[in-house]
């Protein structure tokens, strides 16, 4: 049986709808361009993120005066350890006002005990504001501003805060040279 004209037309239309085979070189070029565009977009997004992100400095947790155990001495001469505060503390034995005590030293005459007062600064943190030299039993010196410093009652030299170095009594080891085991 010979095909009719309508069947011939259908067969030609069917052939027109067949898939066109693209050259292999064109496929590689399209894939390469797509990969480059995606990479460029990723780089631009990363650069935009780096430029517009808000860098907030990481702040280490700060210790407050209440986090530190201080050595206190009352006006009656009793010592005790309690957490720090900016106001005087009542002595647990006699009830008299007590202040934190630090050790300052003169190069010629050795260590002296110094009472310390704290005040809260504008930032809300406690700062050393006043110092008082403990001179003998019952004898208290005058409060002096911390910025003015203290002087030795014997020779008038400036007193420096004594650095407590746990290695200072070991032979051959000084606090300045801690690199050796």
Image (cartoon, rainbow, N blue to C red):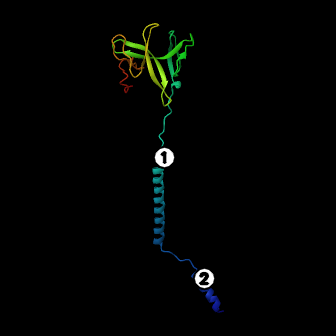
Which residue lies at the image location 59% right of the left edge and 86% below the top edge? 12
Which SS class for mark 1? loop
Disc 1 packing (10 Å; few <14; some 14–19; many ≥20): few
Image location of residue 85, percent across then percent down? 52, 22
Q: Decide if residue 100 is on the left or right side of residue 15.
A: left
* Rendering quarter of residue 107: top left
Disc 2 + disc 1, Cβ < 8 Å: no
> Callout 2: few (<14), some (14-19), or many (20+) C-alpha neighbours within 10 Å?
few
Q: Height in image: 77 above or below 66?
A: above
Give the percent coordinates (x, y) of residue 35: 48, 62
Pinpoint residue 87: horizontal percent, then vertical percent: 52, 20
What is the spatial separation of the Cα atoms under label 2 and label 1, in whole angstroms?
62 Å
Q: Secondary structure at mark 2?
A: helix
Q: Position of residue 59 (x, y in %)?
A: 48, 36
Q: 111 above or below 24?
A: above
Q: Nearer the viewer, residue 33 or 67?
A: 67
Tell me the residue that label 1 is attached to.
54
| The N terminus, quarter of image | bottom right
Q: Is residue 7 or residue 94 the one in the foreground?
A: 94
Q: Is 10 above or below relative to 140?
A: below
Specify which label sits upstream in the sequence, 2 or 1. Answer: 2
Q: 68 left or right of 9?
A: left
Q: Which mark is residue 14?
A: 2
């Amino acid at each position: 049986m010979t095909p009719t004209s309508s069947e011939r037309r259908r067969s030609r239309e069917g052939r027109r709808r067949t898939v066109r085979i693209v050259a292999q070189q064109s496929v590689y070029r399209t894939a390469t361009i797509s990969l480059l565009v995606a990479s460029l977009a990723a780089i631009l997004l990363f650069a935009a993120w780096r430029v517009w992100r808000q860098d907030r400095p990481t702040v280490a947790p700060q210790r407050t005066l209440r986090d530190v155990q201080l050595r206190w001495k009352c006006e009656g001469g009793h010592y005790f350890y309690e957490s720090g505060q900016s106001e005087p503390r009542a002595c647990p034995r006699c009830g008299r006002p007590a202040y934190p005590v630090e050790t300052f030293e003169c190069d010629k005459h050795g260590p002296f005990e110094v009472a310390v007062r704290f005040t809260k600064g504008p930032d809300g943190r406690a700062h050393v504001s006043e110092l008082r030299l403990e001179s003998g039993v019952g004898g208290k010196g005058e409060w002096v501003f911390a910025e003015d410093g203290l002087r030795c009652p014997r020779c008038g030299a400036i007193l420096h805060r004594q650095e407590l170095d746990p290695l200072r009594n070991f032979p051959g080891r000084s606090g300045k040279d801690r690199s050796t085991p």
